[in-house]
Image (spheres, rainbow, N blue to C red):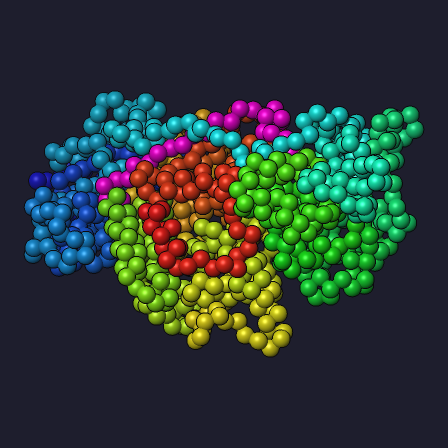
C-alpha cells in the first residue's frame, strides 16, 4: 500500500521513499530507547526553541513480526518484552541483546518512517502470541525449552513526541488505513492526545496516561494509625515555669523553649537535696543521723553523693532544640541593670566551684551539622553579642589565648576522637587542657556504644556541666540510655552495673511494672522530653500507599522468594557451621533482591540473575573479598552488628552522623559473620596480633567500610542502570508509576521530598520524573559535601524545582526542609526511627503548611513483613528485653528461622 506524505510538513515519511526525498543530516541520530544509532538517511528538522509540550499520541498494535526462536526459552518469554527497533525491519531486546526478531515486510515502511522522525520517542514491545504461552504452570522459569523456529509474534508501538507533530502523526497513519489506539502499558505520565480523537484537539483537556489504567495503584492510599511512641514513657516536666530569654537572642522563644531554659538552668545548679525538686537524691534526717536516699531504688548511703550538673534534652525532632541550647549559652552573659528579675538571678546562681573553669561552651556535633549550627547562630543571635568559632580541619584553635572573646567552640565527634586517639588526654591539646564551662553533645545517641573510642574520648573531656541532646535517647535497648548517663557522670547510674541492678535486672526477673516506674522516676530527674502535641505545628496527615505488582513483577518476586525458602529448607538439613553461614548469606541476598524488586520491578530482573547469588558451602578468601562489603551492608541494614571482641555496635543511624573513619585500619568481617571493629583491629595490629574469627582454621576475612554512604549502594552494580537513565521510554516499575502520578496531581507550588535507601531507586524515580517533565534535584552520597548546601538552597528558593530526591543515609538527619509540604518514603526501612527522622525534615518548627507523608509498600511482599517488624521494635517489651551486649553471637539456625518468618 503506497504511503502519502503528510502535506503540512515533510517529517513523517515511509522508509521506502526516504532515499528520494530525505535530506542527509549525518550518520547518527539520538534514539530515545537506546541512545545514538547509525542512520544512513534522515530528514532535516527545524526544531522550535524553548520548552515544547510532549504528549503521548497513542499506540499502534499488531505489527506482525517473527522472533528468532533460539534466542529465548518459552518459560522466560514475558507477555510483553521491551524491544528496540534497530532498523526498519529488525529489532532486539532492550535488556536481553540475544532476543532478536524481524518485522514483516509489509510493515517496514511504517517502522522506517517512525525511525526517521527523530523527534518521536518510541516505546516498543514484542507481544507473545497465545500459541507461544507455556501450556501450564508446570513449565518452570528455569526451563530451557526454546521457541519454535521462527516464532510469530507482533509489535506494539506507543508514540511520544511534541504536540507540533499532532497533525502529521495522525495523517501518517490514517493515510495507510491505521488508527492509533489507547496505550496499554504506557511508561510515561503525560497528556494523552490521540490525533484520531476529536476530544484531543486541546492538550489541556486531554487525560493523563496514568488515568488510562482501570485500576490505578496510586488510589489505594489509607490513613496510617499512629500508635503511642515508646519514648512517651519518658515524657516529663510539663509544669515548668518559663524563664525570660537573654536579650542577645533575637528570635522569640516558644513557651516550651522558655520552659526548657528553666529546666536547664535548674539542672546546672546541681543536686539540691530538696524534696521539692525532682532529683535522684534526697537528704533524710533521723535519730540515727543524716543520710542520703536514692529516690529511684530507695537505697541509703551516708556519704554525700557526687555532684552532677547537666542532663538530657530529649524533645522530639522538630522542637527547636538547637535554638534552646543557644539560649542556654546566652544565659551566661551579663544581664543589663534593670532587666534582670529575681527568679532569673536565682537560676543563674550556679555556684561555680573553682577558678580553673573556663567560660566557654564546647558544642560537639556530627560533621554534617557544623554548617547547620552556624546558620542557626547567625539567624538567632544578635550580631556582636554571642561569638563562636570552629575547631575543625584547618580552623583548629591551637592556644588557650585563641579563646579570648569566644563564647562557643564548635567541633565534631571525629575531631575529638582523632585527637584522643593520637595523643590521649595530653594537656598540650586544647580540647583536653581546659575545664569547659559546658559540654553539649548534639545527636548524642552517637555515643550509645560506651566502649567505642569515640565515647571514651568524649568522657575524657573535662567540664562543669554536661548536656546531651537527642530525640532518641532509647532506640533499641536500655543500654542506649545508660551510655548517655555514663558521659553525663550522673552518679550512681554512670555505672552500668548499678543501672542494671536497679532497673534492667528487674525486668529480667519479671517485675515489669517496677522496672518501668524506676525508669520513669530516673527520667524525671535529669531528662526533659515533652509529647509531640506540646509544639503547635500544622497538621500532619500520614498516608500509606499500597502498590500491586504487575503480573510480570509478581512472577519475578515469587521466583526469588521461592529460592530463599528453598535455601532455608535445605540448610536445615546441613550440620556444618559453614553451610549454615552460607545459607544465611544467600537468604540475606535473596531478601535484599526481593526488596529491590519492590522498587525496581523488572529492571532488577533484566540486570541481575538472582540465581548467581547462590554460594558454595565453602568460601575462599578471594570470593569473600569480593562479596564481604555487600553482605556487611545487608546485615547491618537489618540490625546492629557487634564487634566480637569489645561488643561495639555498628548501628545504621549512628553511622549516618559520624565522619567516615580515616583510620588506616578498617573493620574486618568474616564469612561466618563475625565482626572485628576498627578500634580492635588497630589494637591487635599494635600488639602484633591478627584478627581472626575465633575458629580454627579461621574463616575467610575481608576489610569492610563502615561508611554510612555505603548503605546507599544497591546490591547490584549501579552502572547497570545506565541504559535506563538514558532512556525516555523505559517501562517504569509499578511503585514509581504511582509516585510520579501522585506528584503530577499536586499543585505546581507544592514542593516534595522523596526518600529511599538506595541511590539506584532514586535513579529510576529521577528517570520517571524526567519523563513527566517534573524538575528535581539530588541529595545523596555522590553529591560532594561542599555542594550540598547549594542543593538545599536551590530547592528552597527555586520555584521551578518541585522535588528533592534524598537517600536516607544523607538526608534523614540535620536538614530543615520546611519549604516542602509532602514527603514520600519509597520503601519501609528496618529501623523505624530512621523513617521518623526523615519525615521530621519537613514537619518541624518553621513549617507553615499542612504536611502529608506517604509511605509506599507493595502488597503481599517482604515490605509488609518489615512494617510488622517495625511495630514490634517500637514496643517497650522489645527494648527492655534486648541484650545489653553483642558478645553472644546468634546461632546460624536461629538467624535462618528469623529470616524464614519474614518470608
The foreground one among 405 and 627 is 627
Q: Residue at x 30, y 25 (%)?
A: 206
Residue at 49%, 43% (x, y): give it: 878
In the image as oriented, which residue stretches furthest toward the bottom? 688
Residue 216 higher or lower than 784, as above or below: above
Q: Residue 548: within the magenta?
A: yes
Report the residue at 26% width, 47% height from top: 558
Q: Seen from this angle, which residue lies furthest front? A: 287
Of the pair 74 and 353, the residue shown nearer to us: 353
Q: Is residue 775 magenta?
A: no
> On screen, 684 above or below 565?
below
Question: Which quarter of the figure has residue 827?
Answer: top left
Count of numbered circles on the image: 0
Tell me the residue at 87%/36% (across/down): 349
Residue 363 image point, x, y percent: 72, 47
Q: Is residue 797 left or right of residue 494?
A: left
Q: Is residue 48 visible?
A: no
Q: Is residue 854 left or right of residue 160?
A: right
Residue 502 or residue 779, whichever sits in front:
502
215 lies above or below 580: above
Residue 579, by quadrant, is: bottom left
- The N terminus lies in quadrant: top left
Location of residue 370 in the rendering, given as x and y in whole percent from the top left corner: 67, 47
Query: Is 801 displayed left or right of 51 in the figure?
Result: right
Residue 621: in sight, yes or no? yes
Q: Position of residue 596 (x, y in %)?
A: 36, 48
Estimate the x, y position of residue 265 in percent, counting from the top left. Answer: 79, 35
Q: Which region of the structure is painted magenta?
A: 529-553
Q: Is residue 558 left or right of residue 679?
A: left
Amino acid at each position: 500500500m503506497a504511503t502519502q506524505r503528510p502535506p503540512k510538513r515533510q517529517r513523517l515519511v515511509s522508509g521506502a521513499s526516504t532515499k528520494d526525498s530525505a535530506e542527509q543530516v549525518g550518520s547518527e541520530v539520538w534514539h530515545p530507547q537506546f541512545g545514538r544509532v547509525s542512520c544512513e538517511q534522515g530528514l532535516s528538522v527545524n526544531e522550535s526553541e524553548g520548552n515544547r509540550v510532549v504528549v503521548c499520541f497513542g499506540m499502534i498494535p499488531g505489527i506482525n513480526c517473527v522472533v528468532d526462536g533460539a534466542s529465548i526459552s518459552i518459560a522466560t518469554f514475558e507477555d510483553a518484552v521491551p524491544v528496540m527497533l534497530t532498523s526498519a525491519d529488525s529489532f532486539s531486546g532492550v535488556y536481553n541483546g540475544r532476543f532478536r526478531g524481524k518485522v514483516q515486510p509489509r510493515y517496514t515502511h511504517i517502522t522506517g518512517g517512525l525511525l526517521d522522525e527523530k523527534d518521536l520517542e518510541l516505546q516498543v514491545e514484542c507481544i507473545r502470541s497465545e500459541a507461544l504461552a507455556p501450556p501450564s504452570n508446570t513449565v518452570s522459569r528455569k526451563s530451557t525449552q526454546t521457541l519454535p523456529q521462527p516464532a510469530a509474534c507482533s509489535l506494539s508501538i506507543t508514540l511520544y513526541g511534541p504536540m507540533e507533530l499532532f497533525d502529521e502523526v495522525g495523517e501518517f497513519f490514517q493515510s495507510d488505513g491505521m488508527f492509533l489506539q489507547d496505550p496499554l502499558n504506557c511508561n510515561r505520565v503525560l497528556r494523552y492526545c490521540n490525533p484520531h480523537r476529536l476530544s484531543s484537539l486541546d492538550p489541556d483537556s486531554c487525560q493523563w496516561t496514568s488515568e488510562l489504567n482501570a485500576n490505578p495503584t496510586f488510589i489505594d492510599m489509607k490513613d496510617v494509625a499512629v500508635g503511642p511512641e515508646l519514648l512517651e514513657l519518658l515524657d516529663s516536666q510539663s509544669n515548668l515555669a518559663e524563664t525570660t530569654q537573654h536579650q542577645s537572642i533575637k528570635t522569640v522563644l516558644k513557651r516550651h523553649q522558655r520552659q526548657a531554659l528553666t529546666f536547664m538552668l535548674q539542672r546546672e545548679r546541681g543536686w539540691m537535696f530538696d524534696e521539692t525538686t525532682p532529683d535522684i537524691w534526697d537528704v533524710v534526717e533521723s535519730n540515727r543521723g543524716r543520710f542520703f536516699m536514692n529516690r529511684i531504688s530507695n537505697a541509703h548511703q551516708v556519704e554525700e553523693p557526687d555532684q552532677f550538673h547537666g542532663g538530657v534534652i530529649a524533645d522530639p525532632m522538630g522542637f527547636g532544640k538547637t535554638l534552646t541550647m543557644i539560649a542556654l549559652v546566652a544565659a551566661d552573659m551579663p544581664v543589663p541593670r534593670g532587666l534582670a528579675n529575681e527568679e532569673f538571678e536565682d537560676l543563674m546562681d550556679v555556684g561555680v566551684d573553682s577558678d580553673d573553669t573556663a567560660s566557654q561552651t564546647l558544642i560537639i556535633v556530627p560533621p554534617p551539622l557544623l554548617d547547620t549550627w552556624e546558620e542557626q547562630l547567625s539567624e538567632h543571635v544578635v550580631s556582636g553579642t554571642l561569638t563562636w568559632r570552629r575547631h575543625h580541619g584547618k580552623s583548629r584553635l591551637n592556644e588557650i589565648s585563641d579563646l579570648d572573646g569566644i563564647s562557643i567552640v564548635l567541633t565534631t565527634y571525629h575531631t575529638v576522637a582523632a585527637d584522643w586517639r593520637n595523643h590521649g588526654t595530653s594537656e598540650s591539646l586544647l580540647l583536653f587542657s581546659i575545664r569547659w564551662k559546658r559540654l553539649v553533645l548534639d545527636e548524642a545517641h552517637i555515643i550509645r556504644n560506651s566502649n567505642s573510642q569515640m565515647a571514651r574520648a568524649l568522657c575524657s573531656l573535662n567540664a562543669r556541666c554536661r548536656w546531651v541532646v537527642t530525640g532518641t535517647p532509647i532506640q533499641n535497648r536500655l543500654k542506649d540510655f545508660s551510655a548517655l548517663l555514663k558521659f553525663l557522670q550522673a552518679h550512681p547510674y554512670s555505672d552500668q552495673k548499678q543501672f542494671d541492678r536497679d532497673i534492667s535486672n528487674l525486668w529480667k526477673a519479671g517485675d515489669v511494672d517496677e522496672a518501668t516506674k524506676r525508669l520513669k522516676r530516673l527520667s524525671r530527674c535529669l531528662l526533659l522530653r515533652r509529647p509531640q502535641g506540646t509544639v503547635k505545628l500544622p497538621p500532619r496527615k500520614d498516608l500509606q500507599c499500597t502498590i500491586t505488582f504487575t503480573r510480570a513483577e509478581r512472577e519475578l518476586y515469587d521466583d526469588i522468594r521461592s529460592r530463599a525458602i528453598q535455601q532455608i529448607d535445605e540448610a536445615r538439613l546441613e550440620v556444618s557451621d559453614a553451610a549454615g553461614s552460607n545459607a544465611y548469606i544467600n537468604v540475606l541476598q535473596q531478601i535484599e533482591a526481593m526488596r529491590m524488586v519492590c522498587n525496581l520491578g523488572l529492571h532488577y530482573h533484566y540486570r541481575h540473575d538472582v540465581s548467581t547469588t547462590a554460594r558454595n558451602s565453602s568460601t575462599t578468601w578471594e570470593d569473600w573479598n569480593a562479596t564481604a562489603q555487600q553482605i556487611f551492608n545487608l546485615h547491618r541494614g537489618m540490625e546492629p552488628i557487634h564487634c566480637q571482641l569489645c561488643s561495639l555496635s555498628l548501628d545504621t543511624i549512628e553511622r549516618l552522623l559520624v565522619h567516615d573513619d580515616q583510620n588506616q585500619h578498617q573493620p574486618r568481617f568474616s564469612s561466618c559473620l563475625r565482626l572485628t571493629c576498627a578500634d580492635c583491629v588497630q589494637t591487635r595490629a599494635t600488639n602484633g596480633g591478627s584478627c581472626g574469627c575465633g575458629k580454627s582454621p579461621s574463616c575467610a576475612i575481608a576489610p569492610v567500610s563502615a561508611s554510612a554512604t555505603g548503605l546507599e549502594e544497591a546490591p547490584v552494580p549501579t552502572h547497570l542502570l545506565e541504559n535506563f537513565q538514558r532512556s525516555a521510554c523505559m517501562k517504569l516499575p509499578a511503585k514509581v508509576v504511582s509516585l510520579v502520578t501522585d506528584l503530577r496531581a499536586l499543585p505546581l507550588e507544592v514542593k516534595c521530598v522523596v526518600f529511599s535507601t538506595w541511590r539506584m531507586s532514586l535513579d529510576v524515580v529521577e528517570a520517571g520524573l524526567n519523563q513527566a517533565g517534573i524538575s528535581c534535584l539530588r541529595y545523596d552520597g555522590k553529591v560532594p559535601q561542599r555542594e550540598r548546601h547549594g542543593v538545599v538552597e536551590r530547592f528552597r528558593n527555586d520555584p521551578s524545582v518541585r522535588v528533592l530526591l534524598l537517600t536516607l543515609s544523607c538526608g534523614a538527619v540535620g536538614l530543615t526542609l520546611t519549604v516542602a509540604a509532602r514527603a514520600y518514603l519509597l520503601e519501609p526501612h528496618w529501623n523505624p526511627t530512621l523513617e521518623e527522622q526523615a519525615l521530621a525534615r519537613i514537619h518541624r518548627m518553621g513549617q507553615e503548611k499542612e504536611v502529608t507523608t506517604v509511605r509506599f509498600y507493595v502488597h503481599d511482599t517482604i515490605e509488609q513483613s518489615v512494617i510488622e517488624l517495625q511495630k514490634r521494635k517500637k514496643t517497650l517489651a522489645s527494648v527492655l528485653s534486648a541484650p545489653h551486649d553483642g558478645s553472644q553471637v546468634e546461632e546460624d539456625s536461629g538467624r535462618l528461622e528469623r529470616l524464614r518468618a519474614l518470608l
